[in-house]
Image (cartoon, rainbow, N blue to C red):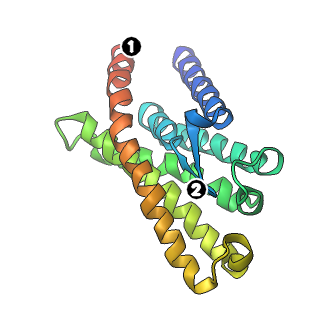
Amino acid sequence: MKKNNAYRLNMLAMFIAIIILQTSVPILGLIPIGPLSITIIPVTVALAAILLGTVDGAIIGGVWGVITFVRAFVWPTSPLATIVFVNPVVSVLPRIMVGVVAGVVYQQLKGRFKKTGIAISVAAICGSLTNTILVLGLIYLFYKGNAPQLYQVNVKALLPYLLGVIGTNGVPEAIFSGIVTPLIGQPLLKVINKHK
């Protein structure tokens, strides 16, 4: 029991360190494009959920969310971050849900396919899309009244603008997650299962 707990804590510490690196070094986690950033951090959160379980995936997602929230005040990743990510519902909740969704989807699918990679890929895609849809949906919900000042678009154009962001940022992020996560996750699962 102590060995398993120590292993889990070590894995959590490793994932937290990776999240800190990804949020600190732009190319490792966020690729800035215009006012937004293409986020590749959902891969790390999905991997945590797949390798350690849904709860630990949510914890790693929560760490990412808290860092996003703090950075909005001290070192924002974009001009919009200082406005939208200072709200923890927008900055923290979607990140937690990445781990929850990826973990639940993986648990539901892992026995249904001969190849584990399919379950990992679908879980990672769902986790990535969860982040995109929740962040942009919450931005629309909370900030549509401020759309002219924040986005230089009128309120009627805000929804099409955010849907465009899903297409230009969210879909590539999901595809990236769906391809990269199984490439990393499958070998790690084999190693973890051997040492259980």
* Element assignment for label 1: loop
Residue beneath label 2, please?
94
Q: Whole-percent x and y of residue 45?
A: 51, 39
Which residue is depicted at the point 45% across and 35% down?
47
- Residue 163 falls left or right of residue 111: right
In which image quadrant can residue 140 be found? bottom right
Q: Taking 188 as reference, is 117 left or right?
A: left
From the viewer's side, name the closer residue of 185 and 52: 185
Q: Label 1: how many residues lie within 10 Å, few (<14), some (14-19) or many (20+)? A: few
Q: Quadrant of residue 89?
A: bottom right
Q: Residue furthest bottom?
A: 156
Q: Position of residue 106 (x, y in %)?
A: 35, 44
Foreground residue among 85 and 26: 26
Give the alpha-carbon distance from disc 2 to disc 1, as whole Å. Answer: 33 Å
N-term-proximal mark, 2 vs 1? 2
Give left or right: position of 102 versus 154: left
Q: Position of residue 135 (x, y in %)?
A: 58, 61
- State the image coordinates of residue 91 (x, y, percent, origin top left): 67, 55
Indicate whether 28 appears above or below 92.
above
Of 35 and 72, which appears nearest the observer? 35
Q: Please name whichever residue, 102 or 27, is drawn nearer the observer in this view of the structure.
A: 27
Kind of residue at disc 1: His
In the rendered image, which residue does mark 1 sit on? 195
Q: Is residue 181 above or below residue 69?
A: above
